[in-house]
Amino acid sequence: MKFHQPTAGIRVPDGKPLGAALKRITHLGIGAHQDDLEFMAFQGILECYASRSKWFGGVTCTNGAGSSRVGKYKKFTDAEMMAVRRREQDKAAKLGRFSVMLQLDYPSSAVKSPTDPSLKDDLKKILAATRPEMVYTHNLADKHDTHIGVVVAVIQALRELPRSQRPKRVIGCEVWRDLDWLADADKVVMDVSGRDSLAAKLNGIFDSQIAGGKRYDLATLGRRSANATFFDSHSTDAATQVIFGMDLTPLVVNESVDLVDYVAGFIGKFEADVRSKLCQRLGRPPR
């Protein structure tokens, strides 16, 4: 399998032939950076971790060149940092028992470009080869420009596949903006309780991002814990770790739906809910 970036890497942790390893994937995570998959697509990893019939596949789109460098990584060059981050991602794929780990090695500028179709074409090739039932990627309201570049490329790639090859469900996950603002009826609620140790080990692999003081490992588990507790104000917690997602499946089922209008619809519901509650308390009709 050849990609646009000649430095793209493919790893099959258990040594299975690549063709067979791609075909067995049932859950595919597509993230912008090394560590995004472990933070946002943990439900998919868990679904497959101890299963004999389900396999998680990972795709990381960028090369890690722009990573922050502090502490013991302070003097690392771009090339050295990219190598570290790639090794960390491959290590996480082995620990998480991924079927395949693909690192496409794009510079962030290419991912964010509205005129460069290379990433979309590579993702289309991967999706056609794997035909997963579930796809996890970034959500359309994420505040990181590179994350937005990835989710747009994912949706565009899926829309170009024959309908029979499209996944049953596509979920946009929270990383650089959580999704607790979504109306409860619109939230994809992913219960990942009971595997905190595995989650901590996976998150902790990315030392190059954690060592300098950005405790993504603690923040990720903290967000999941907060989601579980603050989800329902009138009942005891049914879960201890929850990830929220945005359902992107309608955008794949019906390619005529506009991406901007789709996410703006969720934002409109949020605004309407806030207005309604405040106006009710003030004794005036919402406008």
Image (spheres, rainbow, N blue to C red):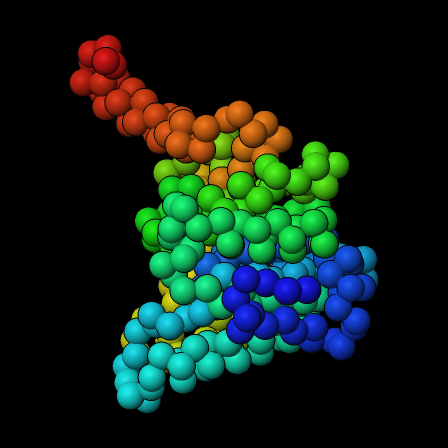
Q: In which quarter of the image is residue 29?
A: bottom right
| Residue at image location 51% in from the left, 54% down from the top | 119
Please state the horizontal and vertical placement of residue 161, each as a whole percent of the image.
66, 40
* Visible residue check, residue 179: no
Q: As drawn, is 109 to the left or to the right of 99?
A: left
Q: As drawn, is 121 to the left or to the right of 35?
A: right
* Visible residue check, residue 267: yes
Please state the horizontal and vertical placement of residue 123, each as a whole percent of the image.
58, 53
Q: In which quarter of the image is residue 64?
A: bottom left
Please state the horizontal and vertical placement of residue 52, each as a whole percent of the image.
81, 62
| Residue at image location 39% in from the left, 32% down from the top | 260
In the image, residue 202 sits, relative to residue 144, either above or below, namely below
- Quadrant holding the C terminus: top left
| Residue at image location 38% in from the left, 52% down from the top | 112
- Quadrant holding the N terminus: bottom right
Q: As drawn, is 168 to the left or to the right of 121?
A: right
In the image, residue 90 sits, relative to residue 4, either above or below, namely below
Closer to us: 164 or 31: 164
In the image, residue 227 sits, relative to residue 276, either above or below, namely below
Q: In which quarter of the image is residue 220?
A: bottom left
Counting every numbered tag in the picture gives 0
| Residue at image location 53% in from the left, 49% down from the top | 120
Please state the horizontal and vertical placement of residue 140, each as a whole percent of the image.
42, 42
